[in-house]
Image (tube, rainbow, N blue to C red):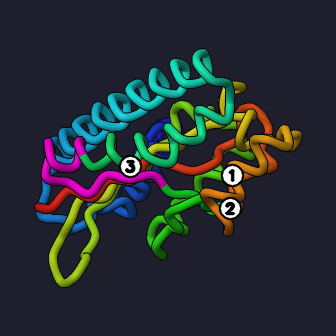
Amino acid sequence: MNRLIALYALPVLLLAGCQADREPQKTGLSETEMMQHAAESRAITQEFGKTLKGELQAAIKAGGPVAAIAVCHSKAPAIAQALSQKTGWDIHRTSLKPRRTAPDAWEKEVLLQFDTRQAAGEDPKKIEYYAVVEQAGKPVFRYMKALGTAPLCLNCHGRDIKPEVQAKLHALYPDDQATGYEAGQIRGAFSIVQPL
């Protein structure tokens, strides 16, 4: 009988030990508050992505891929700015191979984790990360959502880019690194900083 109790108790003790190792970070936010901030951030990235995709599709329909570059160059920052003003947060996109905004140290670490997670089989559409960190001496909630490469994106971010597209990219982004992707690859992320 004692041997049977020991067999049942062992998994419980192991589980209790694992739980103790996963002590919550001292963030000043409850788990519920963390999840609420994440849900709000997720909704904003969805709004950003949906708005930008609509603009890109309309531009491609009207003037082809070269016209879409102008959307990314001027309208994408305007969409980010409008959402930032609406929420009071810093909202932008970044990438390990930037076209415009290079990642800060925290974003770079998260982007590298995203690549590792995708390589391990995780769906880029579901990859996100958030944490409370200190920035300029104050706690902030930081959120990142992986940005996958859709077939539409390959016109300007793929491996086989048409010469006229390449020329426009070079004119607007002389230091462009954001090419060479395949469909489905993570090519960057939406990044949000919420003041607390």
**In the displayed structure image, the side of residue 128 where residue 176 appears, left or right:** right
Residue hosting label 2: 176
Classify residue 113 as left or right of residue 90. right
* Label total for image: 3
- Pick the front one: 183 or 143: 183
State which quadrant residue 151 falls in: top right
Of tags 2 and 1, the one toward the viewer is 1
* Label 1 secondary element: helix
Q: Which segment did they paint magenta?
A: 82-93
Q: Residue at x 64, y 47 (%)?
A: 187
Where in the figure is residue 188, as x and y percent of width and height? 57, 50
- Mark 2 in CB contact with mark 1 (< 8 angstroms): yes
How far apart, in angstroms, are the residues tagged by discs 3 and 2? 16 Å
Q: Earlier in the sequence, mark 3 or mark 2?
A: 3
For label 1, the residue is: 169
**Whole-percent x and y of residue 20?**
33, 61
- Within 10 angstroms of label 2, few (less than 14), some, or many (20 or more) residues? some
Q: Secondary structure at mark 2?
A: loop
Q: Determine the secondary structure under disc 3.
A: helix
In the image: residue 139, left or right of residue 46 = left
* Disc 1 to disc 3, C-alpha distance: 16 Å
Q: Is residue 63 above or below residue 187?
A: above
Disc 2 residue type? Asp
- Amino acid bearing label 3: Pro
